[in-house]
């Protein structure tokens, strides 16, 4: 049985930017503090929501280091270090570990993609060269490749591949993965609206976009699931259902940053090629926030 990195809700944290597009490290420290105060169970830094695709190597490592410093050991810091270049994923992972990352989030190769055999070779190569726990990240809507349950079974044999962030949207596949891998691979929902069903199947939590906006709600929803009170967890999910949906009204992380800015959090813009969403979409987000008493 492998040790779980965290149980509950981990926030896929945004990376705050200044108006000129540079990283706002002061605001990053504030956001990390707000998350921890809000009860969040872990922080994922430099993932999709953290705009890893447009951070250069030095920025990527510096953002991870800043989050590690601010969290000061209070919650696990999971660094997004996946790449479609296997060797570079190792380089970035080692640099993230050197500045204090507790674990690594590894997206599947994208664009050049690979086969299921290639996924096994890719992740085995990385796992043999890093000394921290690895969370796989399966998001076929972005990468064009899907990790099959049978592939998870093979990957779970690696001692430091301990979990997956599953965002393929297929509950039947999730069930099969959990049945095959058991305690050798923890499953985290990669979609907020599937937190309750995945945890009902035995998942250990969620890596959440929603909790950027409402960390306490994300934490409580997962905590109720862990207690076995799925009725209470469902009530929280239903209450936040519109916001969950509308945080993907445009390409992530555009809507979540816009929502946070509407709340006065001043996390800044996304980097190009991402641009702020339409005024009509902002009006939808504003309505959701008002209905939840967040504005």
Image: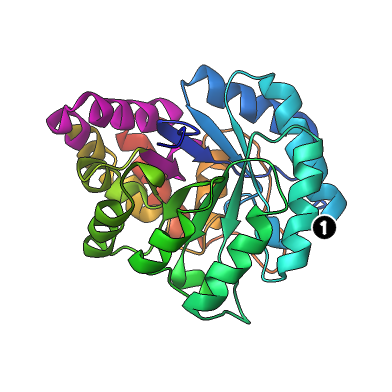
User: Residue 221 appears at what percent x and percent y?
Assistant: 29, 31
- Residue ID at (48%, 27%): 41
- Residue ID at (54%, 71%): 119
- Residue 131 in sight here: yes
Crowd rating for badge 1 (residues with CA inside 10 Å; few <14, some 14–19, many 20+): few
User: Residue 11 appears at what percent x and percent y?
Assistant: 51, 38
* Position of 192 relative to 113 (above/below): above
User: Residue 121 appears at what percent x and percent y?
Assistant: 59, 70
**Label 1 SS:** loop
- Residue ID at (25%, 39%): 237
Residue sitting nearer the eye, 172 or 190: 172
User: Residue 200 appears at what percent x and percent y?
Assistant: 20, 41
**174 within the magenta span:** no
Residue sitting nearer the eye, 44 or 97: 97
Residue sitting nearer the eye, 126 or 43: 126
Q: In this rendering, would 267 be left or right of 182? A: right
- Residue 144 in sight here: no
Q: In this rendering, would 194 be left or right of 8? A: left
Q: Quadrant of the N terminus?
A: top left
* Magenta-tinted stretch: 205-234
What residue sits right under mark 1 in the picture?
A: 56
**216 within the magenta span:** yes
Q: In this rendering, would 69 be left or right of 218? A: right
Residue found at the very far left of the displayed protein: 231
């Amino acid at each position: 049985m492998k040790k779980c990195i965290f149980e509950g809700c981990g926030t896929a944290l945004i990376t705050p930017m200044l108006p000129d597009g540079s990283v706002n490290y002061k605001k990053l420290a504030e956001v990390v503090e707000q998350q921890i105060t809000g009860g969040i169970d872990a922080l994922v830094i430099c993932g999709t929501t953290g705009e890893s695709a447009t951070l250069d190597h030095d920025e990527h490592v510096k953002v991870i280091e800043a989050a590690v410093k601010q969290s000061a050991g209070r919650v696990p810091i999971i660094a997004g270090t996946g790449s479609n270049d296997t060797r570079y994923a190792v380089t970035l992972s080692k640099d993230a570990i050197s500045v204090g990352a507790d674990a690594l989030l590894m997206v599947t190769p994208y664009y050049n993609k690979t086969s299921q055999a290639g996924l096994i070779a890719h992740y085995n190569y990385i796992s043999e060269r890093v000394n921290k726990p690895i969370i796989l990240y399966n998001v076929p809507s972005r990468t064009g490749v899907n990790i099959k349950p049978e592939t998870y079974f093979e990957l779970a044999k690696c001692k430091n591949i301990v979990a997956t962030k599953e965002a393929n949207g297929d509950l039947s596949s999730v069930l099969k993965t959990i049945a095959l891998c058991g305690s050798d691979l923890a499953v985290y929902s990669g979609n907020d609206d599937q937190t309750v069903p995945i945890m009902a199947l035995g998942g250990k939590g969620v890596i959440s976009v929603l909790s950027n906006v409402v960390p306490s709600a994300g934490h409580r929803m997962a905590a109720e699931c862990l207690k076995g009170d799925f009725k209470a967890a469902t009530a929280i999910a239903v209450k936040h259902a519109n916001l969950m949906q509308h945080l993907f009204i445009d390409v992530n992380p555009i809507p979540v940053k816009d929502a946070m800015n509407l709340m006065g959090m001043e996390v800044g813009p996304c980097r190009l090629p991402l641009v702020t969403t339409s005024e009509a979409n902002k009006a939808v987000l504003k309505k959701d926030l008002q209905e939840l008493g967040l504005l």
